[in-house]
Amino acid sequence: MRHLLLPTIFLTVALLGGVRVAADTRALLFVPPPLVTLILAAMLVALFARGGALKVGRWLSADLGAAENVSHALTLGALFFASAQAFNSVLPDAGLPRLVLASFFLWTLWQNQFARFDARRLLRSLAALFGTAFVVKHLLLASLGDPEGGWLRRLAAAALEGVALGGPAYAASTGYVSFFALALYVLGLFLLPPAPERDVDESRAVGLARDLKQLPARERALVVEELSRKTEEGGAD
């Protein structure tokens, strides 16, 4: 799961989060993540680490092999870019709504950086913000951009005359792609363990070696001699 499933899920989110479907030609377009989504992703990953939901010191450690460290680094990198693209999928591409929603995200994440950390509160806030941004972008703004939007579109256009409402119009299937990307992102967060599981005997051996390094040389030699003696007695038995 650590080396294959999680990177695949997060990389898929990183791909789908920037996919848009053109309204006229139905061609697939890819919108790269803007700078604000990278900042939001960095703040979100920092909150995960601060709250213990992601123990970076256990994912990247000198006690692990080089191949395992590289694999874990790729997984964490995929998590970062998936987070950026999750924000990219729900933020409008331009206009006042993008500024407002990005400000809400920034304020929520920045406030949690210094407040008493509550993982459940953070997840509820993120769920509410993601849900609000999704509705605003893929339901409200999409209906306003629809030429057949009816009286609601005309009323909103008159009230917001001269205000940019969110960039170019896309096909309705863009909302389905965004919803699927967000669902995959949530699944990846659910499957992501705080720290990679390791074999119990291996963890004990690493802990014992670390404790031995902290002892003075004379006491370390006595401990090693005692362990060797007990090992020989156990083998004889």
Image (cartoon, rainbow, N blue to C red):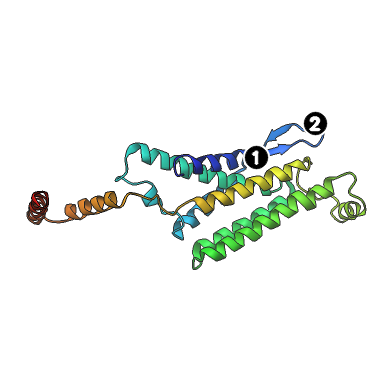
| Amino acid type, mark 1 | Gly
Residue position marked by numbered label 2 in the rendering? 25
Q: Is residue 85 left or right of residue 74?
A: right
Q: Secondary structure at mark 1?
A: loop
Residue furthest out toward the front: 237
Q: Nearer the viewer, residue 117 or 206?
A: 206
| Amino acid type, mark 2 | Thr
Which residue is found at the position 62% from the left and 42% from the top?
A: 34
How many marks on residues?
Answer: 2
Residue furthest out toward the right: 151
Q: Position of residue 25 (x, y in %)?
A: 80, 31
Q: Is residue 57 left or right of residue 143?
A: left
Residue position marked by numbered label 1 in the rendering? 18
Do we see residue 145 in this rendering? Answer: yes
Say above or below: 128 vs 146: below
Q: Residues within 10 Å of mark 1 (few under 14, many from 20)?
A: many
Location of residue 64 (image quadrant): top left
Q: Earlier in the sequence, mark 2 or mark 1?
A: 1
Q: Is residue 219 left or right of residue 209?
A: left
Q: Position of residue 16 (x, y in %)?
A: 64, 40
Q: Nearer the viewer, residue 109 or 120?
A: 120
Which residue is found at the position 51% from the left and 46% from the top?
A: 79
Residue furthest out toward the bottom: 116
> Disc 2 and disc 1: Cα gap in Å?
18 Å
Say above or below: 178 vs 24: below
Q: Is residue 203 left or right of residue 82?
A: left
Say above or below: 215 vs 18: below
